[in-house]
Amino acid sequence: MATVVRVLAVLLPALLPGLTVPAVAQPAPLPWTGSWETAPSGTAAALPGAAVRNVVHLSVGGVAVRVRLSNRLGTRPLRLGTVTVALRRAAGPDAVPGSLRTATFHGAREVTVPPGAEAVTDPVRLTVPSAADLLVTVHTPDDSGPATYHRTALQTSYLARAGAGRAADEDGAAYTAAINRWYYVTGVDVRGVAAGSVVAFGDSLTDGNGSTPDANRRWPDRLAQRLRPYRLGVLNAGIAGNRLLHDGTGPSALARLDTDALDRAGVRVLVVFEGINDIKGVPEASDATAYADAYRALVARAHARGVRVVGVTLTPYGGYSAWTPAREAVRLQVNGFIRTGRVFDAVADADAAVRDPADPARILPAYDPGDHLHFNDTGMAVVADTVHRVLIRRPAGPLPSGRSRPAGPVTPTAPHPATPPRSAGR
């Protein structure tokens, strides 16, 4: 342990100038940092009268929380009757006794969120540790039309069909139905001494397909474990089926960059791992120049907000039903640009880390859950390690703009304050 502390003491000043590993007293007010995120991926039928107890796994802790709730993809006003937060007691829907809090919106317990908008709760005083499971319970009294949700949660949450008054239950006995989607909740920010957040921005490979459900073994979860000594939150903005160039499942990466990444609290680094669905999807995108232009646009927009960008090479999918030699050639061209185009502040070569040396168009069998596209838990850990090494390494050479690159890895010199979403009552 002493060795680890010594190593971190050397690396951290480069990663986060002016900060040190040991926790130190911070001047008031403490900043807000994103601790958990999911990106809206579609809509499901409304659940009028129900209470949904969403289970979310925080990356960093703090002394207060605020919750982001979304009607971004809805078509009618969304009335939220009661929203509560609590620490999860154990596996299941029970809250830690004494931890349940009712959230408010500008002091009111109810709020109506217009279509296309989001709402952020007032600060909720609740001390939450790093890696805690939080229960975010949402009661919707009415049929508010299509419910904004995240489909591939890989996390069991719970539903009380007769939800009136149940959002404030510490006992989860009323939550008799298990669900595998997150409804309405899209983020949890914490107030504390966290040094900022890293956004993992991508498709199903980032969303976690192939990893063990209810185990938090997606590669962003593993990265959060590795970055915990640095007090960095990790936000998972992956959407299974998402695309870089076109709308797919959810808006395209270019369309959702601000809402799902740059507008989040305390963002310091954006990790872009997206493009494979454009190569293998319909309509397929076979012009590597279009990918290069899209990556340049993403990076330019992030740089304009003071956010550094790590590009991740596209990983092999030989053996998957949509693989063809022509599409493989496009993947290799795109990876060539990611590695040598000098657009990204740093490159995490996931392709090199997970490919089979005997057949580079395929994932190593040890990392393959069986579909030849996604990663199992072991493969997810390898991707996390690959990104982690880049985040703590000192880069060299000039930025693409010609400016001198500051000492230290890809983290900017100060957290970027969140841009408040368009919110009910604001």
Image (tube, rainbow, N blue to C red):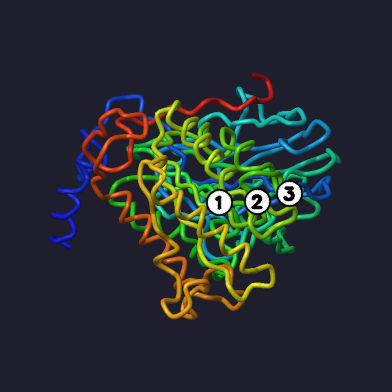
Give the Cα separation between the discs numbered 1 and 2.
Answer: 8 Å
Q: What is the secondary structure assignment of the residue under circle 3?
A: strand
Q: Which residue is mark 3?
A: 51
Q: Is residue 289 left or right of residue 177?
A: left
Tag 1 near tag 2, CB within 8 Å? yes
Indicate the quadrant where residue 389 lies: bottom left
Q: What amino acid is labelled 2 in the image?
A: Asn
Of 230 and 246, nearer the camera is: 246
Q: Residue at x 56, y 39 (%)?
A: 294
Q: Residue at x 52, y 74 (%)?
A: 362
Q: What is the secondary structure assignment of the residue under circle 1?
A: loop
Q: What amino acid is labelled 1 in the image?
A: Glu
Q: Which residue is mark 2?
A: 242
Q: Could you tell me residue 225's position as x and y percent?
A: 37, 58
Q: Which residue is mark 1?
A: 274
Q: Is residue 6 left or right of residue 272?
A: left
- The label nearer to you, 3 versus 1, is 1
Give the Cα separation between the discs numbered 3 and 1.
Answer: 34 Å
Q: Residue at x 76, y 28 (%)?
A: 114
